Image (tube, grey):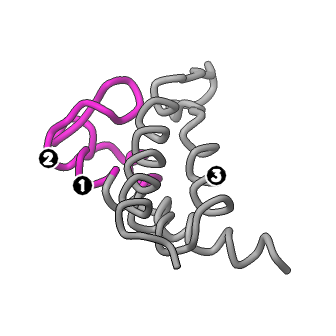
């Protein structure tokens, strides 16, 4: 049985990893949507952790952005980081991290 402290540590680690990798951004001239490495963190949280840990870590990441912390891509957060049309991609992170674990074992 996994301890609660270990689960909280995993959630904090995956949330932090997503926030750090979100800052590694590649801008392409033909699209306003940047490519970031935060998708790698979402995949890792879903495959290495349990589906619940991946889900909670990504929901925590979104809650921190919504609270105003500048941890989204390009150091954006709060209203400035959530009103653009392409900023809705992180909403699907929690769903992706949950489903990736189930798909990785089939």
> In the depicted view, which residue is nearer to us: 65 or 34?
65
Specify the label residue 63 is tagged with. Answer: 1
Neighbour tally class for label 3: few under 14, some 14-19, many 20 plus, Cα within 10 Å: some
SS class, disc 1: helix
Horizontal side of residue 43 vs 16, given as left or right: right
Neighbour tally class for label 2: few under 14, some 14-19, many 20 plus, Cα within 10 Å: few
> In the depicted view, which residue is nearer to us: 11 or 65?
11
Q: Is residue 50 within the magenta segment?
A: no
Query: Which residue in the protein does label 2 denote?
Result: 67
In the rendered image, residue 99, in percent from the top left (x then y), is placed at: 62, 74
Horizontal side of residue 51 vs 106, given as left or right: left
Q: Is residue 83 within the magenta segment?
A: yes
> In the depicted view, which residue is nearer to us: 104 or 74?
104
Horizontal side of residue 71 vs 94, given as left or right: left
Query: Which residue in the protein does label 3 denote?
Result: 44
Q: Nearer the viewer, mark 3 or mark 2?
A: 3
**Residue at the image position 35 percent from the left and 36 percent from the top:** 72
Q: Marks 1 and 3, how far apart in space?
A: 19 Å
């Amino acid at each position: 049985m996994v301890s609660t402290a270990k689960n909280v540590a995993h959630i904090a680690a995956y949330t932090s990893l997503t926030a750090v990798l979100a800052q590694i951004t590649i801008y392409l001239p033909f699209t306003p949507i940047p490519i970031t490495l935060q998708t790698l963190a979402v995949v890792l949280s879903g495959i290495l952790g349990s589906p619940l840990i991946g889900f909670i870590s990504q929901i925590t990441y979104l809650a921190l952005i919504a609270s105003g912390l500048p941890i989204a891509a390009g150091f954006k957060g709060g209203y400035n980081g959530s009103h653009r049309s392409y900023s809705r991609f992180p909403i699907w992170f929690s769903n992706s991290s949950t489903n990736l674990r189930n798909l990785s074992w089939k």
